[in-house]
């Protein structure tokens, strides 16, 4: 298998895919393995800047659970194997 040139863009895409996949798996198995769904929200509350012509609202919140973190590590493993 040919080596792929590693870049920050590939890492970010893999981390996003890994987190979505991990969250999906955590939601699927939350009744069977309840520890996977233990979560914590971190982030910045939305802030609004009103400039009369436009209004800009910025904010970010991450809802991390155990399965999401497992997805991050799987994505990092896949990135390291590229």
Image (spheres, rainbow, N blue to C red):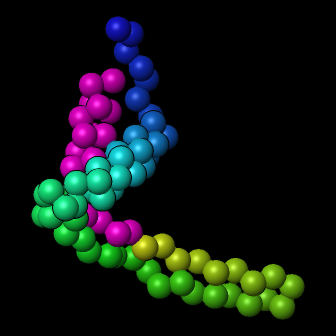
The residue sitting at the right extreme is 53
Residue at image point 33% right, 24% down: 82
Of residue 1 and residue 37, the one placed in the foreground of this image is: 37
Residue 55 covered by magenta stretch: no
Residue at image point 36% right, 47% down: 21
Q: Position of residue 27 (x, y in %)?
A: 30, 58
- Quadrant assignment, res 8: top left
Relative to residue 48, is residue 7 depicted above or below?
A: above
> Chief secondary structure of the magenta span?
helix
**Seen in the image, is 32 located left or right of residue 27?**
left
Relative to residue 22, is residue 54 depicted above or below?
A: below
Q: Position of residue 67 (x, y in %)?
A: 23, 55
Q: Position of residue 41 (x, y in %)?
A: 32, 76
Residue at image point 29% right, 65% down: 64
Could you tell me which quadrant the N terminus lies in? top left
The residue sitting at the top extreme is 1
Which segment is the magenta one? 62-82
Residue 78 covered by magenta stretch: yes
**Seen in the image, is 73 located left or right of residue 60?**
left
- Quadrant assignment, res 31: bottom left
The residue sitting at the front extreme is 31
- Quadrant assignment, res 40: bottom left
Of residue 60 and residue 38, the one placed in the foreground of this image is: 38
Q: How many marks?
A: 0
Of residue 44 and residue 17, the one placed in the foreground of this image is: 17
Q: Can residue 68 be seen here?
A: no
Q: Can residue 33 be seen here?
A: yes
Q: Position of residue 5 (x, y in %)?
A: 43, 23
Relative to residue 18, is residue 27 depicted above or below?
A: below
**Seen in the image, is 22 located left or right of residue 6?**
left
């Amino acid at each position: 298998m040919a080596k792929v040139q590693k870049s920050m863009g590939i890492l970010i895409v893999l981390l996003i895919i890994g987190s979505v996949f991990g969250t999906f798996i955590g939601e699927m198995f939350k009744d069977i393995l309840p520890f996977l769904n233990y979560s914590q929200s971190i982030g910045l509350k939305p802030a609004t800047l009103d400039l009369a012509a436009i209004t800009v609202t910025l904010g970010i919140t991450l809802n991390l659970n155990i399965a999401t973190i497992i997805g991050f590590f799987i994505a990092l493993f896949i990135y390291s194997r590229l």
